[in-house]
Image (spheres, rainbow, N blue to C red):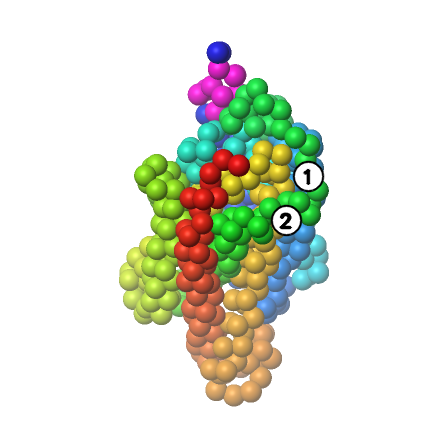
C-alpha cells in the first residue's frame, strides 16, 4: 500500500518546521512584554498587581474562554486555516500594544493577543495526532514546542536590545509584523489531513460529539482526568516564574534591564529546550517498556523542580541562583510533551481537538490567568509587610517614590518578589501528586476500547 503523501518524511518535516515558527512567535510575543514590563511600569505608573494582570489575567480572559469554541471549530473545519488566522490576529494585536497609553488600552491589546493565541494549541495537538503514530506523538509535539523556549530566548534577547535603542513601543512593532508573514506561510504551506490519518488512513471517524460528551470523557477516564488537572496546576508555576524573571534579576542583583533580559533569554531558552527534548524523546522511549513512564518521569522532575526554584530564588550569589533556576526550568518542561501526547492517545479521533481545547482552557486559566497575577498580588503584599512603615504602595509608587525612601522601597520590593515567586513554585509539587495518581490507571486506560 502506497504511503499517504501527508505521512511522508519530507512533509512531516515541513509540518513540524512551520508549526515550530508559529509556536516560536506564540511565546515570543508574550515574552517581550515581560522584558519591557519595567519600562511600561514606570511610564504608565503601574503597580506590581497591574503588571501581573497584564501579563496573566488580561491575556487569559479570552485565551481560556475561547479554547472550547476553537476546539469545536477545529472538529468541523480546517485546523490549518484556524491556526493561520489566529496567528495573524495575535500578531496584529501585538503590534497594537505599542500604541497603548494607559493601563486600560494596554489591557485591551493584551486581551487581543490572548484571543488570537487561543487558536493554536487545540488544532495543533489534533494535527500532530493525525500525522504521527501514538508512540511518536510526545517526540513530535516536543519538536514543535521547542518554539516556546527558543521564542522566549530570542524574544528576550532582541527585546532588550530594541528597547534600549528605540524604546519599549518599538519592541511590539518589531515582533508583530513577522507574525503576519508566518500566518501566510501556514495558510499556503500546510494541507489539512484526513481525521485519524496516522491511526488508520482508511478509517472515517464518527461525527464530532457534543461538549458534554467531551467533558464526560475527560472526567471519566481517570488517568486523563489527573493528567489534565496536573498539567494545569503545573502551568501556574511556569507562567508565574516566566513573566517575572526579568524583574527578579533586576531587583535581586541590581542588573540593567538589557542584561537581565539577555540572561533570562539564554537561561530559559536553553534549559526549557533541553527539558522539552528529554521529556518528549525520553518518555517515548521509556514508555516502550512501561507506559507509566509518561507520567512517572514528570512527577519526579516536578518535585526536584520545586526544590531547585525555592533555593535558587533565595540565593544571594548570582552564579548559584542561575544554576538552580536553570535546573528548575529544565525540570518544569519535562511534563509537557508527554501530557499533550497522552491527551491525544487517550481520546477518540472525533473529539481530539475538543479535548485538547479543554486542556488548553484550563492550562491558560490556571497558569496564565493565575500565575503572574498571583505573583504580582503577593509581591505587593509581602513587600508591604516587610516595609518599615505603613503606606508602601503610596510611598513606593513606580516613577514617584517618596523622597528618602528609595533604598527602603527597593529592599521591600526585592523581598516581596522573592517571597511571591517562592510561593508560586509550590504548584509544581502539587502537580506531581496528580501525575502519580494518573500512573495507577494509565496502562488500563490506554488499552483499545
Q: Residue furthest top?
A: 2
Is 173 in the magenta? no
- Sequence-earlier tag: 1 or 2: 1
Look at 52% across and 46% down and name the residue there.
27
Look at 51% across and 27% down and name the residue there.
199
Q: Is residue 246 left or right of residue 349?
A: left
Look at 58% across and 33% down and name the residue there.
349
Can you tell which mark lies on residue 215? 2
SS for dot 2: helix
**Is residue 384 visible to us here?**
yes
Q: Main secondary structure of the magenta part?
A: helix
SS for dot 1: loop
The reply to whether the C-beta atoms of the residues labelled 1 and 2 are less than 8 Å apart is: no
**Is residue 67 visible to us here?**
no
Crowding at label 1, few (<14), some or many (≥20) Cα neighbours within 10 Å?
Answer: few
Crowding at label 2, few (<14), some or many (≥20) Cα neighbours within 10 Å?
Answer: some
* Above/below status of 350 relative to 308: above
Is 5 in the magenta? yes
- Viewer-proximal residue, 41 or 212? 212
- Residue identifier under label 1: 209
- Viewer-proximal residue, 323 or 286? 286
| Image coords of residue 207 (percent x, y) | 69, 32
| Image coords of residue 251 (percent x, y) | 43, 67
- Residue extent of the magenta highlight: 3-12
Q: Residue furthest bottom?
A: 389
* Above/below status of 404 relative to 427: below
| Image coords of residue 354 (percent x, y) | 63, 42
- Distance between the Cα atoms at labels 1 and 2? 10 Å
Amino acid at each position: 500500500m502506497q504511503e499517504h503523501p501527508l505521512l511522508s518524511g519530507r512533509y512531516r518535516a515541513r509540518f513540524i518546521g512551520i508549526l515550530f515558527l508559529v509556536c516560536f512567535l506564540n511565546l515570543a510575543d508574550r515574552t517581550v512584554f515581560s522584558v519591557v514590563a519595567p519600562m511600561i511600569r514606570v511610564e504608565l505608573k503601574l503597580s506590581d498587581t497591574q503588571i501581573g494582570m497584564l501579563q496573566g489575567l488580561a491575556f487569559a480572559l479570552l485565551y481560556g474562554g475561547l479554547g472550547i469554541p476553537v476546539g469545536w471549530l477545529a472538529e468541523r473545519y480546517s485546523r490549518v486555516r484556524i491556526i493561520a488566522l489566529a496567528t495573524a490576529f495575535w500578531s496584529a494585536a501585538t503590534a497594537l500594544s505599542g500604541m497603548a497609553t494607559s493601563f486600560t488600552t494596554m489591557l485591551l491589546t493584551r486581551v487581543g493577543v490572548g484571543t488570537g493565541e487561543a487558536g493554536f494549541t487545540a488544532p495543533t495537538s489534533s494535527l500532530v495526532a493525525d500525522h504521527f503514530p501514538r508512540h511518536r506523538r510526545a517526540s513530535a509535539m516536543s519538536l514543535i514546542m521547542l518554539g516556546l523556549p527558543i521564542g522566549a530566548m530570542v524574544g528576550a534577547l532582541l527585546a532588550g536590545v530594541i528597547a534600549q535603542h528605540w524604546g519599549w513601543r518599538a519592541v511590539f512593532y518589531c515582533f508583530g509584523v513577522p507574525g503576519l508573514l508566518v500566518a501566510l506561510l501556514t495558510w499556503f504551506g500546510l494541507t489539512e489531513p484526513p481525521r485519524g490519518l496516522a491511526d488508520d488512513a482508511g478509517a472515517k471517524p464518527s461525527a464530532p460529539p457534543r461538549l458534554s460528551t467531551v467533558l464526560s470523557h475527560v472526567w471519566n477516564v481517570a488517568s486523563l482526568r489527573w493528567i489534565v488537572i496536573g498539567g494545569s496546576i503545573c502551568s501556574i508555576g511556569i507562567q508565574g516564574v516566566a513573566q517575572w524573571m526579568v524583574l527578579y534579576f533586576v531587583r535581586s542583583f541590581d542588573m540593567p534591564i538589557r542584561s537581565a533580559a539577555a540572561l533570562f533569554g539564554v537561561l530559559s531558552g536553553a534549559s526549557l529546550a533541553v527539558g522539552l527534548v528529554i521529556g518528549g524523546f525520553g518518555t517515548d522511549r521509556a514508555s516502550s517498556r512501561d507506559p507509566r513512564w509518561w507520567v512517572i518521569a514528570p512527577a519526579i522532575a516536578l518535585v526536584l523542580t520545586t526544590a531547585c526554584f525555592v533555593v535558587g530564588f533565595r540565593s544571594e550569589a548570582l552564579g548559584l541562583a542561575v544554576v538552580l533556576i536553570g535546573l528548575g526550568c529544565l525540570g518544569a518542561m519535562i511534563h509537557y510533551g508527554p501530557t499533550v501526547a497522552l491527551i491525544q492517545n487517550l481520546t477518540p479521533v472525533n473529539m481530539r481537538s475538543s479535548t485538547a481545547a479543554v486542556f488548553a482552557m484550563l492550562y491558560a486559566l490556571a497558569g496564565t490567568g493565575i500565575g503572574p497575577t498571583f505573583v504580582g498580588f503577593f509581591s505587593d503584599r509581602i513587600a508591604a509587610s516587610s516595609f518599615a512603615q505603613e503606606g508602601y504602595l503610596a510611598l513606593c509608587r513606580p516613577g514617584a517614590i517618596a523622597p528618602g525612601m528609595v533604598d527602603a522601597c527597593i529592599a521591600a520590593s526585592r523581598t516581596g518578589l522573592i517571597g511571591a515567586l517562592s510561593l508560586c513554585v509550590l504548584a509544581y509539587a502539587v502537580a506531581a501528586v496528580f501525575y502519580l495518581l494518573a500512573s495507577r490507571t494509565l496502562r488500563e486506560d490506554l488499552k483499545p476500547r
